[in-house]
Image (cartoon, rainbow, N blue to C red):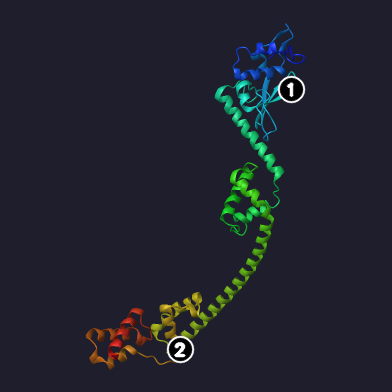
Amino acid sequence: MSDGAVRWDGSVPDHIIENLQRGVAPHEKRVVANLAAVSRIVNTENMTIRTYDDFKHDWEYTHSLYAKVGEHSCFLCGKNHIRELCQVYDKEQDLTITVGNECVWKHVEIMTDAAEGLTGDAKRDFLKAAMADAKAKFFRAKFAREVDLTHWDEYRDYATGAREGWPVFGKENRTYAKRADRMIRERGYLTGKTEEWFMAKRRDFRADVFRWKEDAKKAHAERLHLNAEAARRRRERDTDATNFRANAELGVDDGRVSPVLAKGIASVEQGIRRYGLHGLKWGLKDTYDAIMAGLLGKPMVDEPIEVFHAHYDDLTPWEHSFLHSISEKRTSLGLPLTPKQQKVFDKIKKKVAA
């Protein structure tokens, strides 16, 4: 850098430009000519023309920026419609020019507090990181200008299930809403399919939230009704279970309920509390029916022993043993037969009836 240098007064003559371009690769001649037009190429100490390798060091990189298509061109190479730009600055002239990111890598020295005299891959990595920051800044500003996030927080909460604990707008919206929220918080803008979804969906945010709130009111009222109905049924089952136990224990005391059936009172009571009178099944229902028959004073019918005596000569020894066993252990005590026992007993009855 030379402090005793000034710009050429007016347009730089062609012969001077040609001298400056000597030894320069053909694709760099335009760069030399354009930079010479704004550089301090005249050395005032001896009134000579500075070389390109000398005056190009007057310019220092300051920062990167990202722009809309069609707004900028590179001052050095003349390329139009570029988006990745850098600002380079001549302190002595207090002059800034806009240069393409690639031209800075090729022709401008990086002289900053963070990095000085970078070359090769290190220089490219520095510019790449700086451009990434510039892009993020550009898209954050663009997103802030174009997007109204007034109803986003509510929509996000409903879509992802943060409110009420479940998503209400479907799996696809839940996925995109989570992704969009993460991008907005971490980057400040959206990209790709998430941006497309957001832009297409944002018109519906307010309507969707309003509809959800109305649906939520109806659902809340329905839940209150169902809870009240469940509580009523629970109280009804508890009352039936308490009354059953009290009556069954009285039946045990006065002999209407056999000691064997008395052992099942607690299980039946639990079943009534859990399933209700009409929900009892299998053994619990059979035991309940047997106890209630005893409480109502219905005569106990021991059908297996009646078949045993009435058709003794028509039965096999095994059938004699089977009928005597189920009578002794089940029917004589008021207990119903098991499904398997009932099936065998029905076959025996069918045989003797024939």
Question: Which amino acid is tagged 2?
Answer: Leu
Q: How far from the left and from the top, in percent, is residue 277?
A: 49, 80
Judge whether 323 appears above or below 137 on screen.
below
Looking at the picture, tell me which residue is in the foreground, 266 or 11: 11
Q: Residue at x 59, y 71 (%)?
A: 226
Judge whether 165 appears above or below 199 on screen.
below
Looking at the picture, tell me which residue is in the foreground, 148 or 344: 148
Q: Quadrant of residue 297?
A: bottom left
Label for residue 338? none
Q: Residues within 10 Å of mark 2 (few under 14, many from 20)?
A: some
Q: Residues within 10 Å of mark 1 (few under 14, many from 20)?
A: few
Q: Earlier in the sequence, mark 2 or mark 1?
A: 1
Residue matched to label 1: 95
Is residue 79 something that shows in the picture? yes
Q: How far from the left and from the top, in percent, is residue 3?
A: 72, 13
Q: Residue at x 58, y 26 (%)?
A: 124
Q: CA distance from mark 2 to mark 1?
A: 110 Å
Q: Tell which tag, 2 or 1, sits nearer the viewer.
A: 1
Is residue 162 something that shows in the picture? no
Q: How far from the left and from the top, in percent, is residue 141?
A: 69, 39
Q: How far from the left and from the top, in percent, is residue 331?
A: 35, 86
Residue matched to label 2: 295
Q: Quadrant of residue 145?
A: top right
